[in-house]
Image (cartoon, rainbow, N blue to C red):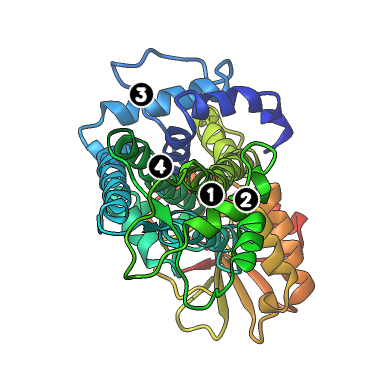
Amino acid sequence: MSSALSVSTATILQFFFRHGATTAMCRWLDFRLFVAQKHLRLEASTQVENYDADTLSPAEYLNRWEQRALQQTDTSALTTPARWVLLLLGSLVALVGLASMAGVLNYSGRQPINIWVPLVLFAFLPLLLTLSSAYVALFSGARQSVAGHPLLLQLADKLRLKHFLPYQNVLFPWLVWQAQLLGLVFSVAALLSFFALATFQDYQFGWSSTLITDNATMVQMMAVISWPWHWLVSSPGVELISQSRFTAQEMAAQGINQRGWWLTLVMAVTVYGILPRVALALLLRWRFIRQLRWSILNSADVEEFVLAQQYQPSRNPLVSDDPLVLPDVIDIRATNADLISWQQPQSDWPVVKNLGSGDWLEDEQWLSSSASARPRPVLLIVDPLQTPTGEMADCIELLQQQNTVVVLVLVSTQIDAERYEIQLKSWQFFASRHHIALKKGH
């Protein structure tokens, strides 16, 4: 963000985050889509008082944008996630957790419950899923893309957030955070189900194994499993393990103190099934908020929007004696060149890369890699209504380092002649300053 707006960064962040992180993401991505449409100017209306463009702060401009969006009859003007979908999914996952624990505890009343079954289902399996989720979300190459995760893509669709897919660097961290919360609901519901059932019914636990043939091996294994909480709850001892071993034909042992088994089960579900998910969910939430804050502070969208509001055509414009020099016209589709767009994520052009709409670190990484060294000339397509920014200048410099021919192409849709002339002069100055050819595309 430019220095002119840097003094207001705290206020801008407060504007987006004032109703929580999820609402901040939706407001920010709604705003980015609004800027991408290039209809930036908020026309005066009877519902909004006249204002002096030089006295309003960026946050006040953003408030006016939000008020206009809320006044529109189109309900999609400001996105609200379908929270009922998350509530429904959470309820279903909780019911699955409750039913799963109840099924394990009551599958048979004729012999003790094999302790390995609830340990695997509610402790070790959730731990494995948590570790795999951490790898996918934090370390894998697809950690910023929803394309390789059909379940997350379907979740985004059900939550009515699919139109945010062009900004996956913010949407993906939020989706994986919500997925971890659902996993946490399952484990907590299973543990609550155990306490609810064990309060009113006596369950007998034991162990049985085809591969483990001696009690000493079982003692060592339980000592390893119980190590994280050995300072709080002791591991099942030799006597308990020896007394509670059973075969498929034996009935539940009588007179055995089961406290060591059910405490071990509770601690295992808590330590292996719940606490890792809590830690991962908190880490993903922190990472999502950090990514969202970075996106807001390092995007030129707020600056472009504010500059559009402050644009006031002069009633007595200065007339230059030099005639306006129109750039050469180039047919984009008939040109043997590689196309790169600037802040046009929904462009119909067959572009190699869209820059300026996502994470700047990703753009910089791509521009510095061999992928940006194109075998053909490079055409950087921009809309004349866009505002030249320092971020764009940095992209052009990196492109010029990797390519011999880089051309800036203005592709206009609907723009009046007076506005186009003013914008064109701005682009000509920008092009001459950064030593790049400027052409008009059609």
Amino acid type of the residue that numbered disc 4 sits on in the rendered structure? Leu
Residue on which the image places disc 3 = 67
Observer-side mark, 4 or 3, equals: 4
Observer-side mark, 2 or 3, equals: 2
Quote the CA–CA distance across marks 4 and 1. Answer: 10 Å
Quote the CA–CA distance across marks 1 and 2. Answer: 7 Å
Observer-side mark, 1 or 2, equals: 2
Residue on which the image places disc 4 = 191
Callout 1–callout 2 Cβ contact below 8 Å = yes
Callout 2–callout 4 Cβ contact below 8 Å = no
Q: How crowded is mark 4: few (under 14 residues within 10 Å), some or many (20 or more)?
A: many
**Dot 4 or dot 3, earlier in sequence:** 3
Outermost residue on the front side: it is: 255
Q: How crowded is mark 3: few (under 14 residues within 10 Å), some or many (20 or more)?
A: few
Quote the CA–CA distance across marks 3 and 1. Answer: 51 Å
**Dot 1 or dot 2, earlier in sequence:** 2
Residue 395 vs residue 114: left or right? right
Amino acid type of the residue that numbered disc 3 sits on in the rendered structure? Gln
Callout 2–callout 3 Cβ contact below 8 Å = no
For image coordinates 43% across by 54% down, the residue present is 122
Report x, y in % for residue 302: 56, 36
Is there any visible trace of residue 193 in the rendered image? yes
Callout 3–callout 1 Cβ contact below 8 Å = no
**Dot 3 or dot 1, earlier in sequence:** 3
For image coordinates 63% across by 68% down, the residue present is 217
Report the front residue among 29 and 347. 29
Residue 10 vs residue 342: left or right? right
Residue 435 vs residue 319: left or right? right
Residue on which the image places disc 2 = 226
Q: Residue 268 carries which label?
A: 1
Report x, y in % for residue 339: 55, 74
